[in-house]
Every structure is written in structure tokens, then in C-alpha cells.
């Protein structure tokens, strides 16, 4: 009788997505980890800062901190001009609006002095990462090619503790 009951309970538990012997807390924790903690959270690729004057900001980083800065790149698809500041362990991306409809123009209207815009994390497989994270957070649009020539996508800041997060596929 107990063997039959045990088999019945095991099948009921598996029906609802639980593994045999799981508590509710273990089940929820496993499901959460499976949807978020995979290859999504890779190395910090860069921190992006929106600036009202790209040339002045780049010169400030070069003069004050003594770091290398890249040439300006205009990314029409994203509506931004960027300059990268190279640090030993990551990069800073300085962003400036390219056109009136740029998302950075809207950001600078609210924050005229500029400020932190987003962080970028690397992932090995962007498509897989989108599938996994979209179970719990909103993905903003379809992947586009970013400043490094790699596919990127953004995660909604309201779902990411108030921070816009960019995922970039490391090719």
C-alpha cells in the first residue's frame, strides 16, 4: 500500500513540476535559478554614461584619469554617437544623442548633466539568454548589432532593480 501511495504521490508531484522530495521553496528557487543564472551573467563589458558633450567628456577622461579613448563612432541604428574609454578590467561607453529621436536625447532632457545610462553584460549565446531571461523580465525589442559589431539586446530597467541592462553576445 505504501509503495503504491508513494508512486502515486511521486507522479502527482512530478505533474506539477516538482522533483520528488522538493519543498515548495526548493522548487521556486530551482525554477528561478534556471531562468536567470545560466550563461546570461557574463563579464561586465562596459558601463554606459550619457553625456551632453561627447568631445569634452572624452577629453576629461583622457586628461584627468590618463586613459585611452577611442575615436567617435556614430551608430545610426541606435541613434547614438559613442566613445569608449579603455580601463584595465572593462570599458566606459560615453553616449551622446545622434538626432532628435535618440533615446539618449530623451535621457538628457531628464538628466541635463548626463549620468549612468546602462550596464552591459556579456553572454555566450544571446538567443538562449533572451529565451531564459524573458521568463522573468521584459526584453526591449529585437537584437541589433552594437558598437562592437556584436548582437545586443536590452532588459527593462523596471525588471532589473532600476537599471537598464544590455546583454551583448561575445563572438
Image (cartoon, rainbow, N blue to C red):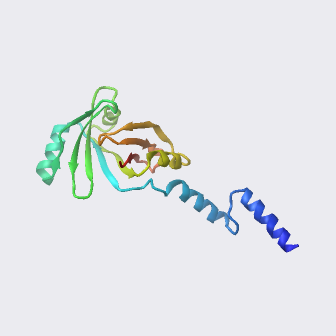
Which residue appears farthest toward the bottom when viewing the image? 2
Please provide percent x and percent y for residue 153. 42, 41
Pick the residue in front: 46 or 10: 10
Which residue appears farthest toward the left when viewing the image? 63
Question: How many discs appear?
Answer: 0
Tell me: residue 58, above or below residue 105: below
Which residue appears farthest toward the right when viewing the image? 1
Image quadrant in which you'd find residue 30: bottom right
Please provide percent x and percent y for residue 9. 79, 65
Pick the residue in front: 131 or 106: 131
**Residue at image x 42%, y 55%?**
41
Please provide percent x and percent y for residue 98. 27, 30
Quadrant assignment for the N terminus = bottom right
Please provide percent x and percent y for residue 58. 17, 43
Judge from the rendering whether residue 88 lies leftward or rightward of residue 137; answer left or right.
Answer: left
**Residue at image x 22%, y 58%?**
88
Tell me: residue 109, above or below residue 168: above
Image quadrant in which you'd find residue 152: top left
**Residue at image x 67%, y 67%?**
22
**Residue at image x 46%, y 49%?**
160
Judge from the rendering whether residue 4 lies leftward or rightward of residue 159; answer left or right.
Answer: right
Amino acid at each position: 500500500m505504501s509503495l503504491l501511495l508513494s508512486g502515486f504521490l511521486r507522479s502527482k508531484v512530478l505533474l506539477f513540476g516538482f522533483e520528488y522530495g522538493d519543498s515548495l521553496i526548493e522548487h521556486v528557487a530551482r525554477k528561478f535559478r534556471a531562468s536567470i543564472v545560466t550563461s546570461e551573467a557574463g563579464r561586465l563589458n562596459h558601463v554606459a554614461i550619457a553625456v551632453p558633450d561627447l568631445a569634452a567628456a572624452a577629453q576629461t577622461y583622457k586628461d584627468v584619469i590618463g586613459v585611452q579613448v577611442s575615436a567617435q563612432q556614430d551608430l545610426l541604428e541606435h541613434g547614438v554617437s559613442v566613445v569608449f574609454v579603455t580601463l584595465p578590467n572593462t570599458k566606459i561607453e560615453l553616449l551622446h544623442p545622434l538626432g532628435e529621436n535618440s533615446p539618449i536625447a530623451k535621457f538628457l532632457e531628464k538628466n541635463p548633466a548626463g549620468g549612468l545610462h546602462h550596464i552591459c553584460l556579456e553572454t555566450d549565446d544571446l538567443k538562449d539568454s533572451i529565451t531564459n531571461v524573458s521568463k522573468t523580465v521584459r526584453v526591449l525589442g529585437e537584437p541589433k548589432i552594437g558598437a562592437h559589431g556584436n548582437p545586443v539586446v536590452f532588459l527593462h530597467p523596471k525588471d532589473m532593480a532600476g537599471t537598464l541592462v544590455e546583454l551583448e553576445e561575445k563572438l
